[in-house]
Structures are given as structure tokens and as C-alpha cells.
Amino acid sequence: LVLCFRTLCCKGPPPPRPEYDLVCIGLTGSGKTSLLSRLCSEATDHVGPTTGFSIKAVPFQNAILNVKELGGADSIKKYWSRYYQGSQGVVFVLDSASSDEDLETARTELHSALQHPQLCTLPFLILANHQDKPAARTTQEVSNKIWDTNIVSHYDSSE
């Protein structure tokens, strides 16, 4: 009787939201954990570096993103590719206020991920984080640092 009433009044249970598996990578301190915590409406006051990996389910109205966040320390980066299988998209987070040396390291890691056989056909979101810091580069400056200038003009979002 309860099931019949629910079906008549509520038109049954809501359809399940589709789930997508993403991998989130970037150097230590780029803001991966804070980003995911904010998307999940969690506090970011005491966020520390991720050792190993963590998984968060990020709920949206029409979908759920299951995000594998991989730590960015040198000792962990060499294991990133072990977690790529099954991913349907990539979020690459970089610190737009980092040193030139760290940005070059991020560039190298990004290009390596873009060429990885399990990732090269997937959608990539490249997030230039920490735009609120005084030393932050603009998104155009970050683009110029991580891409050839010929590629930047092709993908320039201001056109």
C-alpha cells in the first residue's frame, strides 16, 4: 500500500543521477583538496597535503562526480598513472602564484598527462588556482607559460 501511494503521489523514486569518474592531479600546494572540499561544501580551514590519494563524491543537481585526488609530492607523482584507469575526465590544478620553477614542473606534468595513453582522449579541465593571491599570474600569463604561443592563440577563450 505504501509503495502504491508513493508511486501515485511522488511518481516513484527520482531517477538515479549519472556518475562520472574523474582524476584530479597537480603539484603539492596547487589547491586540489581545497577545491574539492569547497565543491562538497566542507570547511577548508585545516586542509593539508594529500598523502597518497583520496576519493570524494562531488554532488551536482544532475550528476555525481567521483573524483580521485592524487597527492602531488615527488614521491607520489610517479604512481599517478596507476590511478588513471577508468577515468572519464581529468582536472589538472596548478598554482598560478607559484615560482617559475614550480610552474615549469607543473607544465611538464601536465604535458606528460596529456600524452598518457589512458588520458590523452579524455576531457581535461586545467584550473589556474590561487587567482586571489597578490603574486598570481593572469590566466593568459599561465597559458603562455604552459603552452606554445601558437597553441594559445588557437585556444584563447577571449576570441
Image: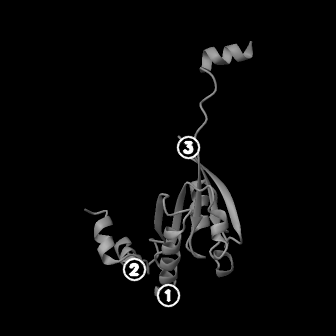
Question: At 64% from the left edge and 81% from the top edge, which residue is drawn?
Answer: 74
- Cα gap from disc 3 to disc 2, whole angstroms: 33 Å
Q: Which mark is residue 145?
A: 2
Mark before the other along the chain sequence, 3 or 1:
3
Q: Secondary structure at mark 3?
A: loop
Residues at marks 1 and 2 touching, judged by CB atoms closer than 8 Å: no
Locate residue 53 relative to residue 15 in the image: left or right: right
Residue to which mark 3 is pinned: 63
Locate residue 75 relative to residue 97 in the image: left or right: right
Q: Residue furthest bottom?
A: 101
Question: At 69% from the left edge and 13% from the top edge, which residue is drawn?
Answer: 4
Q: Which mark is residue 34?
A: none
Where is residue 22? Give x, y as percent. Answer: 58, 56
- Cα gap from disc 1 to disc 2, whole angstroms: 11 Å
Question: At 53% from the left edge and 40% from the top edge, which residue is drawn?
Answer: 62
Locate residue 62 relative to residue 85 in the image: left or right: left
- Cα gap from disc 3 to disc 1, whole angstroms: 37 Å
Where is residue 96? Give x, y as percent. Answer: 46, 76
Based on the displayed image, in which of its 4 quarters is residue 33 positioned? bottom right
Q: Secondary structure at mark 1?
A: helix
